[in-house]
Amino acid sequence: MANRKIILDCDPGHDDAIAILLAGKNPTLDLLGLTIESGNQTLDKTGRNALNICQFLEIDVPVCLGVEKPIIKEVEICDAIHGETGLDGFDFPRLKKQFDQRHAVNFIIESILSSKEKITVITTGPMTNLALAIKLEPKIIENIEEVVLMGGSYQNGNVSPAAEFNILCDPEAAYIVFNSNLKITMIGLDVTRQVLVYPNIIDRMDKINNKASLLFTKLMTVFNENQKRVFGFLGSPLHDPVTIAYLIDPSVIETKLVNCTIDISHGPSYGRTNCDIFDYLKKPKNAYIAMNIDVEKFWNIIEKGISRYK
Ligand code: RIB
Ligand code: CA
């Protein structure tokens, strides 16, 4: 299969780190760069984490810092789950890799406008960078293959009864993207809460015994400790890598094309992804929503992705 050109916009973050790991060495994906924003932690920390992950795993791609704050809201970080550094649990070697000097929004615009092939944009954090790129240069829309996001849910939220963290961090950004006539695949909590990093999964990946398995094991151990303390989970939902697993093997999830609107009404459902699964409203269908996931196939993709490293 020809390489699919991708940009990964993220807020590393323990699960973002595994998404980067999975994308970094996959032969069917051409990772053009990482664009970073605040979310799990402040931008200075998520940016440093991205550099550390790329340097440790020898993923030689540009890392571009993006917008520091959401379009309307104040920054809301998720340090209870991801810790003070945003990536607690791993002692990286001295950091030498430096940021690319281009702003993330400009990197997204320049990469897409200059590409002969269409580019797939994956977001695993708030959607601020992509939303502003679309607003700044709407021409990029015609050269985007699709947007694959980890975010939202057609059921309940995880930071309010209604909303999932990535969307609630910047609902207005999500609103812009979901109303941009792009092909959108939304991988929400409905499926990511089915891929749980139980201790047996950590043991399975630890046996691979390379630097990627070391990173996975150390990060997931702390991720589990924090998720247990906050949510009582015995295994953390490994949200973000499902986006990359879908690109590697689309059959890992089942999707349904529905109308999905983002609630920006500033009420109790602010930031909710209202997915009209049963087409009650007969409105135009604008998003493919992940409905089911093949859990075994997902962990096989993760295991194979880790095994690609030295
Ligand atoms: O709600 C889960 C999402 O929020 C994931 O992307 C996780 O990294 C956090 O950013
Ligand atoms: Ca994330």
Image (spheres, rainbow, N blue to C red):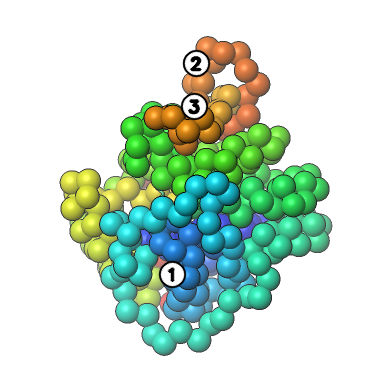
Q: Which amino acid does label 3 sit on?
A: Asn
- Write down the residue under mark 1: 45
Q: Distance between the residues labelled 1 and 2?
A: 41 Å
Task: Check contact, mark 3 vs mark 1: CB within 8 A.
Answer: no
Secondary structure found at label 2:
loop
Image coordinates of residue 147 in percent, x first then y, are: 62, 45
Task: Check contact, mark 3 vs mark 2: CB within 8 A.
Answer: no
Residue drawn at point x = 74 percent, y = 52 percent: 136
Q: Distance between the residues labelled 3 and 1?
A: 32 Å
Residue drawn at point x = 55 percent, y = 46 percent: 72
- Write down the residue under mark 2: 278
Judge the density around disc 1: few (<14), some (14-19), many (≥20) Cα neighbours within 10 Å. many
Establish whether ligand 1 lies closer than 8 Å to the Cβ of label 2.
no
Camera-side residue: 268 or 23?
268
State left or right for residue 298 relative to residue 288.
left
Q: What residue type is labelled 2?
A: Phe
Camera-side residue: 34 or 60?
34
In the displayed structure, 1 sits above or below 296; it is below
Task: Determine if residue 127 is in view.
Answer: no
Judge the density around disc 2: few (<14), some (14-19), many (≥20) Cα neighbours within 10 Å. few
Judge the density around disc 3: few (<14), some (14-19), many (≥20) Cα neighbours within 10 Å. some
State left or right for residue 24 relative to residue 211.
right
Residue drawn at point x = 29 percent, y = 48 percent: 196
Residue drawn at point x = 47 percent, y = 33 percent: 266
Image coordinates of residue 275 in percent, x first then y, are: 50, 26
- Write down the residue under mark 3: 274
In the displayed structure, 43 sits above or below 163; it is below
Secondary structure found at label 1:
helix
Establish whether ligand 1 lies closer than 8 Å to the Cβ of label 3.
no
Q: Which of labels 1 and 2 is toward the front?
A: 1
Upstream in the sequence, badge 1 or badge 2? 1
